[in-house]
């Protein structure tokens, strides 16, 4: 019986994915659990493995954009044919011939390399089977994948193989230092044999982004092989491609504003005691490498407040206000390509020390492109902060179908009256919370009660350490 291989839907917001690599060829036999292909969404890279044994027939080519749940391949029993009306993917050679000669992109089926593995030819490299994580790690370390023996199925190179590669294999960037590049740019450069040190960056603080590598590929092999001068950035002044995460974020936010009745309310919080607690915890947990942040304190406070006010921990689905049984708080991490929101699960019951360690790990993985689908799905409420940029208050936009989102402003000191009769003044620390609600699910009064609850936890921060 034919077994359909589909593009899995990774979370409620995923609409489509792009196939980045096939690990098998059309007609190859596969066993259950063998890796089939990798794809990328606006958030993460992911690998799909075979759920049945048989012969695989490919229905999508590399770089094909497939809707979530769309057919990518079939796994057939011996002698079995594709279902009637199903068209297989074109052979790589045919795809290469149909591509315009002026495109400058690497051909789909590159010619075999010489005996010396990893040699660059006509802007392309010999195809090397490697996991996306292994490719990204090799690009970061300047390691030629063709010099590594793979320990995975069919000789596929895994992350562990790259980590074990001898230091002599790695080549330092031409600039003598670490090249700043986005995870997508690193992966694309590794796939096309592009030396990142030869690419002119156009991103913030001299960071190489995907578009820079694409221009390097289009410029042809000469610039890549010589490495004599950086490749000139070509876009018109001030122009930025509207695609990838940036486009997805924009479309999601527009959808949110058009489809919800959003209302924002603000409330000031006295963080003086929380500042003292954080300072003490940073010192106490220093030997364990855990550095709690103010955002961690807000996430924990929000988690506890969501347990106290479950209607805020809800989503609108099929004309039903679905109150979520668990509290999973997402927090926004800013990347060059846009915002990404990893999720702290069970934020209400998780000890603050564990929460702080987990948030730091997730933020690091987000910046390195190492988040998994599990890291990004299942959030029931989001926290976003602009305080580090000196913003006092703002209007955060809700991530559908959640009921609300909490924004965190900057921490600032100012004099405040502290005695009952208003005669004593001392220096105290304050920040502003900005909460946006979907007025279809929540009214202003219960929303204000929720923010008051967050405020209470932050102004009495010992409650954040109390076992639940």
Image: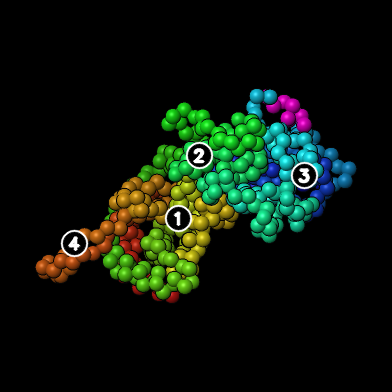
Q: Choose the circle earlier in sequence order: 2 or 4.
A: 2
**Magenta extent:** 93-100
> x%, y% of residue 108?
72, 35
Look at 37% across and 62% down and name the residue there: 294
Task: Judge whether residue 179 can be spotted in this image.
Answer: yes
Q: Choose the circle earlier in sequence order: 4 or 1.
A: 1
Q: Label 4: few (<14), some or many (≥20) within 10 Å?
A: few
| Label at residue 201 | 2
Q: Label 3: few (<14), some or many (≥20) within 10 Å?
A: few
Q: Choose the circle earlier in sequence order: 1 or 3.
A: 3
Measured in 3D between alpha carbons, the distance from the residue under mark 2 to the one under mark 4, in whole angstroms, is 45 Å
Viewer-side residue, 120 vs 370: 120
According to the image, label 1 marks what residue? 331
Measured in 3D between alpha carbons, the distance from the residue under mark 2 to the one under mark 3, in whole angstroms, is 31 Å
> x%, y% of residue 268?
27, 58
Query: Element under label 4?
Result: strand
Q: Choose the circle earlier in sequence order: 2 or 1.
A: 2
Look at 68% across and 58% down and name the residue there: 166
According to the image, label 4 marks what residue? 415
């Amino acid at each position: 019986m034919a077994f359909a291989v589909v593009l899995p839907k990774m979370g409620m917001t995923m609409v489509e994915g792009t196939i980045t690599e096939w690990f098998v060829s059309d007609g190859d036999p596969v066993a259950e659990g063998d890796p089939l292909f990798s794809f990328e969404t606006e958030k993460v890279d992911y690998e799909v493995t075979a759920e049945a044994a048989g012969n695989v027939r490919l229905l999508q080519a590399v770089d094909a954009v497939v809707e979530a749940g769309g057919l990518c391949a079939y796994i057939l029993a011996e002698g079995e044919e594709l279902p009637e009306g199903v068209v297989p993917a074109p052979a790589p050679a045919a795809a290469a011939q149909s591509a315009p000669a002026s495109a400058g992109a690497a051909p789909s089926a590159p010619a075999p390399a010489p005996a010396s593995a990893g040699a660059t030819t006509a802007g392309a490299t010999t195809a090397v089977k490697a996991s996306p994580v292994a490719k990204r790690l090799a690009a970061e370390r300047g390691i030629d994948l063709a010099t590594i023996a793979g320990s995975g199925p069919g000789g596929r190179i895994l992350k562990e193989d790259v980590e074990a590669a001898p230091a002599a294999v790695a080549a330092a960037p031409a600039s003598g230092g670490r090249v700043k590049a986005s995870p997508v740019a690193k992966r694309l450069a590794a796939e096309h044999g592009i030396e990142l040190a030869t690419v002119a960056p156009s991103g913030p603080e001299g960071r190489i982004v995907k578009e820079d590598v694409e221009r390097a590929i289009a410029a042809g092999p000469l610039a890549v092989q010589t490495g004599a001068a950086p490749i000139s950035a070509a876009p018109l002044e001030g122009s930025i491609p509207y695609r990838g995460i940036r486009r997805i974020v924009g479309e999601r936010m527009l959808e949110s504003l058009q489809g919800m009745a959003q209302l924002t309310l603000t409330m000031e919080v006295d963080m003086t005691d929380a500042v003292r607690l954080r300072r003490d915890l940073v010192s106490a947990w220093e030997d364990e490498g855990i550095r709690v942040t103010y955002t961690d304190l807000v996430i924990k406070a929000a988690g506890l407040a969501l347990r106290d006010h479950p209607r805020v921990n809800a989503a609108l689905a099929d004309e039903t206000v679905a109150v979520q049984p668990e509290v999973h708080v997402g927090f926004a991490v800013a990347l060059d390509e846009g915002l990404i929101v990893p999720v702290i699960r069970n934020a209400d019951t998780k000890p603050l020390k564990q929460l702080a360690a987990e948030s730091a790990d997730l933020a690091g993985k987000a910046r390195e492109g190492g988040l998994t689908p599990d890291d990004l799905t299942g959030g029931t409420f989001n926290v976003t902060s602009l305080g580090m940029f000196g913003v006092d208050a703002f209007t955060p936009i809700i991530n559908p179908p959640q009921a609300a989102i909490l924004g965190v402003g900057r921490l600032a000191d100012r004099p405040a009256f502290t005695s009952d009769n208003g005669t004593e003044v001392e220096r105290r620390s304050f920040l502003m919370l900005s909460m946006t609600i979907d007025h279809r699910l929540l009214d202003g009064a219960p929303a204000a009660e929720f923010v008051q609850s967050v405020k209470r936890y932050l102004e009495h921060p010992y409650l954040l350490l109390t076992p639940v």
